[in-house]
Image (cartoon, rainbow, N blue to C red):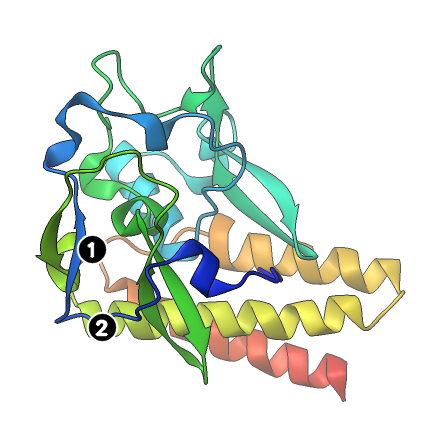
């Protein structure tokens, strides 16, 4: 996202790595679901998020567009995000007890919260968002435990590579007035990385990187 935000204003001023302790543990939220309501289109999904949800819900990615997720424009990129529903604009996956009905397959955005990512030099570190969670009695927990994701080093590499690939796509989008190119590039990203299913019997990451290499080649051809 192209946001001009002073990290000092939204964080505790520290950057964290996987083995650092951070005051993020909400004690199983204790009945609170504030962060699952009123989020608008901000819970943007990456390809792994959509793959996880697709496998967990036993729905093809295209079918998820019928209710669970929607497409919107973010800094020029067309990307999927979770849908909100009802008077309180609750997450589509929030059940009647105020709990996540897809918790094992919840998106990376949700696993991270109230942490955020600070990107630099083709990598990133974590920071604690101090204004986002109303809980005041959070305890310290190791970052890697809080994120609760298998193969964390591989996952971090994927997150960074996807982020910087989208930035490269944005440079092309912002650098052209060719509406056909903009349309085709956005359609390519959505169809190739999100809507074309990944084989659930195979490891996700090699499949993703095969597509990413293809995407980078196409971008280089377009730029040159």
Q: Quadrant of the C terminus?
A: bottom right
Q: Is residue 206 visible?
A: no
> Do tag 2 and tag 1 residues touch (Cβ < 8 Å)?
no
Q: Quadrant of the N terminus?
A: bottom right
In the displayed structure, 19 sits above or below 9; it is: below
In the image, 136 versus 148, the foreground residue is 136
Q: Quadrant of residue 97?
A: top left
Q: Can you give x and y, in whole percent of width and height, for residue 211 in the image? A: 47, 70
Apparent side of residue 203 relative to residue 21 in the rendered image (left or right): right
Q: Residue at x 57, y 53 (%)?
A: 191
Secondary structure under tag 2 reads: loop
Q: Can you give x and y, in whole percent of width and height, for residue 63 in the image? A: 46, 32
Q: Can you give x and y, in whole percent of width and height, for residue 62 in the image? A: 50, 38
In the displayed structure, 15 sits above or below 31; it is: below
CA distance separating discs 2 and 1: 11 Å
Apparent side of residue 186 relative to residue 125 in the rendered image (left or right): right
Q: Residue pushed farthest right? A: 177
For marks 2 and 1, the one nearer the N-term is: 2
Secondary structure under tag 1 reads: helix
Q: Residue at x 54, y 77 (%)?
A: 214
Q: Quadrant of residue 157?
A: bottom left
In the displayed structure, 104 sits above or below 204; it is: above
Q: Which dot marks residue 113?
A: none
* Disc 2 target residue: 17
* Disc 1 target residue: 147
Q: Residue pushed farthest bottom? A: 224
Apparent side of residue 20 relative to residue 116 in the rendered image (left or right): left
In the image, 180 versus 84, the foreground residue is 84
In the image, 35 versus 194, the foreground residue is 35
């Amino acid at each position: 996202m192209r946001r001009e935000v002073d990290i000092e204003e939204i964080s505790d001023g520290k950057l964290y790595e996987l083995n650092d302790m951070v005051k993020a543990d909400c004690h199983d939220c204790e009945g609170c679901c504030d962060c699952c309501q009123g989020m608008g289109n901000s819970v943007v999904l990456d390809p792994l998020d959509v793959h996880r949800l697709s496998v967990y819900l036993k729905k093809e990615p295209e079918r998820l567009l019928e209710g669970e997720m929607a497409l919107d424009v973010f800094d020029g990129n067309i990307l999927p995000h979770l849908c909100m529903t009802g008077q309180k604009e609750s997450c589509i996956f929030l059940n009647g007890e105020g709990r996540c009905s897809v918790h094992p397959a919840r998106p990376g955005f949700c696993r991270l919260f109230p942490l955020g990512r600070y990107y630099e030099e083709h990598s990133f570190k974590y920071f604690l968002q101090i204004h986002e969670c109303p809980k005041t009695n959070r305890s310290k927990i190791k970052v890697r435990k809080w994120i609760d994701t298998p193969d964390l080093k591989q996952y971090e590499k994927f997150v960074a590579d996807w982020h910087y690939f989208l930035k490269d796509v944005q440079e092309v989008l912002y650098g052209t007035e060719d509406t056909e190119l903009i349309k085709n590039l956005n359609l390519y990203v959505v169809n190739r990385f999100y809507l074309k299913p990944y084989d659930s019997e195979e490891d996700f990451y090699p499949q993703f990187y095969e597509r990413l290499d293809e995407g980078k080649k196409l971008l280089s051809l377009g730029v040159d």
